[in-house]
Image (tube, rainbow, N blue to C red):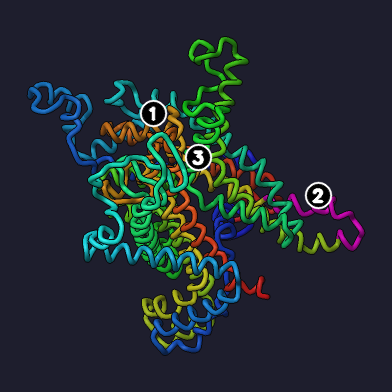
Amino acid sequence: MGLLRYTLWRFAQSIPVLIGIITITFFLANQIPGDPVEIMLGPSPAQEQVEAIQARYGLDRPAHERYLTYLAGVATGDLGWSIYYDRPVLEMILLRLPVTMYLTVSAFAFAIVTAIPLGVLSAKRRNEPADHVSRVVSLVGVSTPSFWIGLMLIIVFAFHLGWFPARGLPLPWASPADVRGASTQVEVVRTSLYHLAMPMVALGTLQMAQITRIERSSMVDSLQGEYVKLARAYGVPESTIVRKHAFQVAQLPVITIVGLGLSTALGGAVLTETVFEIQGMGRLIITAINNQDYELIMGTTFMFGVAFVVGVIITDIAYAYIDPRVTYGDEA
Amino acid sequence: MTARDPDSPSDDARADGTTTDATTDDSPTHDAAAGSDEIETRVGLRYTLRQVKRDTTARIGIYTVGFVTFVAVLASIDYYVFDYAVAEAVWYSPVSDPEEVQRLLPPVFMENQFGTGVLEHPMGTDHRGRDIFVRLFYGTRIAITVGFMATGIGLGGGTLIGAVSGYYGGWIDDVLQRVTETVYAIPFLVLVIAFMTAFGRDLTFAMIGVGITSIPVFNRLIRSRVVSVREEDYIEAARAAGVKDRNIILRHVIPNSFAPVLVQATLQIGVSILIVAGLSFLGFGAQPPTPSWGQMLSASRNYMLPAPTFSLFPGIAILVTVVGFNILGDGLQDALDPRINN
């Protein structure tokens, strides 16, 4: 089976999980106390109004019927209607999702770029001072709440030093008219990167620490492999061994930890967006919850699940692409 | 799908990433099969603790965790038995506003626009004039309670599902694993928020919610242990001797998976504390005026410019506590992993 077919098969395989996610979110949204009609119309509304709203949102039908309607809707790309924003849920999500993806992907880029050299260094200099420093850094990194890092960064770098702005995150491809203080596209990109720096570090630190740990232990294992011993016996320089022989093999566990770290990172985005007042998916779900906007709650929760599933599939494909032992499921 | 059966690559790495398989042969439980599993467990635990004590870093972990837990116990006694009377008698009340309000005082020896730090408030006061140190002290109760309870729920649920799933295999395994996979597919903070919106915003549901999201972690661990233990000779022997399935799982399979689970549970307590702090920060969890670290950080957001130290201390409290559990977890893992044995 080729890589393309493997990809398609992997996507097909995730359909039950997606249906499962919808089921869970529907069940949870159905449990939310309070009457959405009352929230929309205020207390003691006219009977006709109530019935009109109920009919419009299908609230007069039994739960299993609404579930099937919702499922069919999702299959056709209709995630329902946001009562609070008075717009389709999908439209709101498409507006906010790029911001969250921009933040999350940047955070991972930051994490990978810093963690891999740190982990390799740590493994190479095992039990030397450099290793101890890197281990302490990663220990503190996995133990620090991301939102607190955000608060500290704001206090130091925004309020005290004034280097970076404390709130908001304009997209680099936004039009200059929408971004304050920018008149050309280049300035928009620059402003965007300035805004990105602190939330990226706040969200990426945990991932950085986790990847460093895995990279280190994976490299330590790899450097003890038979092929490394053989290369050493042949007199291959140590730097070449690290770079060529040990490194590549050691990256497999790292790739999967990146995929699974997505779950933490997407959840962390909710906190980071709150700290930095970024209008992304995280703020959207909090707004939805605070306003009891059922279909928006379901839609955002579902999209968080989709983002995670897609992320895992991408890492699986990367894994299959790099690891020659993976055979794309030929044997049954 | 992959060369490495039966788990997908991601499953494998999950196991690799969090805990390397520690050995079963560590704990001399096999021959004690006739005794109750409580005794077996204690033997394993004592052995493990002896190993851990030999490692300096792990000892730091034990002391930190011990200290924080001790503080939490003191705070709980004062809260449940005396309703903060002890705190008020000795220092200040962590919950009620003081009569003479001195808001947002800086820590001792420091100065800000609200005044100069005084020794009675070593870490300063919060936005309502309450002593930050006392509130941190009492916030320990929430953190530790939540850490242990949530992990306990995850451990219990995950062990049950993982053991049943791994022992019976077949369609039971398929169904249970697909369900936990689905739970795992929703980013857990989002799932807990949705869960708490549906059932309740207070601390009880925070614990249950975080516990449920950690079920997949323990499930995966236990299941992989059970699948490998299932084939062991002594299980075969027990089955041949006519021991019931339930008893085989309870008496033999689970005790033999004890070591890696202990490591994972210790690390998971730290993770749970972090998640619940995040939840409180968002307004889900312990409700005011109950002191909790996440909620203190949330309140401090409005005063970051004039009183930056207000945001500093609760974060350090979380950091120190979670570092303690992580060091302890790593130490346990090293002690139980035969490959690293000195």
Chain label for disc 2? A
Indicate the chain on which mark 3 is placed.
A
Task: Label the magenta part by its dominant secondary structure.
Answer: helix
The quarter of the picture where the C terminus of chain B appears is bottom right
The magenta stretch is A231-251
Residue holding disc 1: A76
Please say whether residue A249 is one of the residues in the magenta stretch.
yes
- Residue beneath the point at 32% across and 45% down: B284
Query: Are the residues under marks 1 and 2 on the same chain?
Result: yes
Is B331 one of the magenta-colored residues?
no
* Disc on the earlier residue, 3 or 1: 1
| Callout 2 secondary element | helix
Q: Nearer the viewer, residue B320 or A178?
A: B320
Marks 3 and 1, Cα distance to the nearest angstrom? 44 Å
Q: Amino acid at mark 2?
A: Lys
Chain-order first, disc 1 or disc 2? 1
Residue for badge 3: A152
